[in-house]
Amino acid sequence: MKLLAIESAALTASAALLSDGVLSAEYTVTFKKTHSETLLPMVDEILKMTDTSPAELSAVAVSAGPGSFTGLRIGAAMAKGIAFAVDKPVVPVPTLDAMAYAAYSSACVIAPIMDARRSQVYTGLYSFEDGCFTVHEGAAAKSIEDAMRDAYALAEKLGKKIFYLGDGVPVFRTAIENTLGTRALFAAPHMLYQRAGAVAALGEKLFLEGKTVSADAFVPVYLRKSQAEREREESLKRGEA
């Protein structure tokens, strides 16, 4: 089984290939370049370096959101294009689930936070219970205060600390430390941002569970309206006033 994975939900652009349970290749860049510039060369290089033909792929796993509207659309277009070309399914992998899965077997409540702007984060709550990946709360947009409150409540219930990762950490770390103190732990640099390797690993699990869709049917999960849509609505409201 060969699974190509694509991650483009935020600043990080990442592609990976999982071959029979082995992460054969991963290419990750977190820098101010557009995903349209980086992702296709990454995928091309990975396939060349591993002597993999697109026809050998069993499926294409893609980070399905939430996240940046532009990033998600670029990743979706690439995943759909590759999957359609080789007549293989798409595995939609929730972005926050994949981030949490990167902390496999952690003894903490895992709380990925993505900076959603306007003092909000995209977040979810996860843990590994008896070796099983448990989703306590799926992706939602919340204020950082509400996110910390909900994470603390679950951590209290389970008797665990809280492990934070994601691009929301640099933005809200001081607030988290001031509120939660030693109850909060933070990811090291190699785990802080999204990685296609985690999308591939969780994508394999979802693929084996039959959680795939056709290339035509896949649609990213945005959670919120785009900035352009919000600005248009605000403009209309001001005009009505």
Image: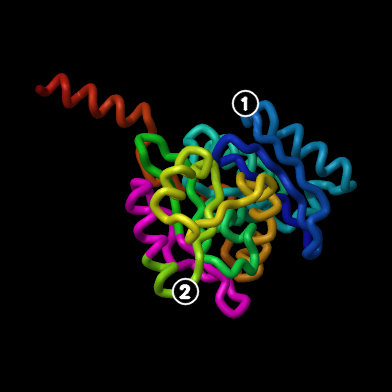
Furthest-top residue in view?
239
The structure residue drawn at horizontal position 58% and vertical position 35%, both measured from the top left corner, is 11
Mark carried by residue 69: none
Q: Could you say where residue 13 lies in the image, as x and y percent from the top left? A: 65, 37
Q: Mark 2 or mark 1, which is nearer to you? A: 2
Q: Between residues 10 and 65, which one lies in front from this camera angle? A: 10
Please tell me which of labels 2 and 1 falls first in the chain.
Answer: 1
Q: Residues within 10 Å of mark 1 (few under 14, many from 20)?
A: few
Q: Position of residue 182 (x, y in %)?
A: 50, 58
Instruction: Look at the picture and state if 158 lies above or below 23.
Output: below
Question: Which residue is at the front of the view, 174 or 62?
Answer: 174
Residue 180: quarter of image: bottom left
Position of the C terminus, as image quadrant, is top left
User: Looking at the image, what colour scheme do you see?
Assistant: rainbow
Q: Is residue 236 left or right of residue 134?
A: left
Please say whether residue 4 is visible from this viewpoint: yes
Magenta range is: 125-152
Q: Would you say 27 lies left or right of 84 here?
A: right
167 to the left or right of 2? left
Question: Three-letter amino acid code at disc 1?
Answer: Lys
SS of the residue at dot 1?
A: loop
Between marks 2 and 1, how big is the CA–CA gap? 39 Å
Identify whether 47 is placed above or below 180. above
The label shown at residue 32 is: 1
Residue 128, image x, y percentages? 57, 71
Residue underneath mark 2:
159
For badge 2, the amino acid type reads Gly
The residue depicted at 53 percent of the width and 68 percent of the height is 127
Front-most of residues 94 and 151: 151
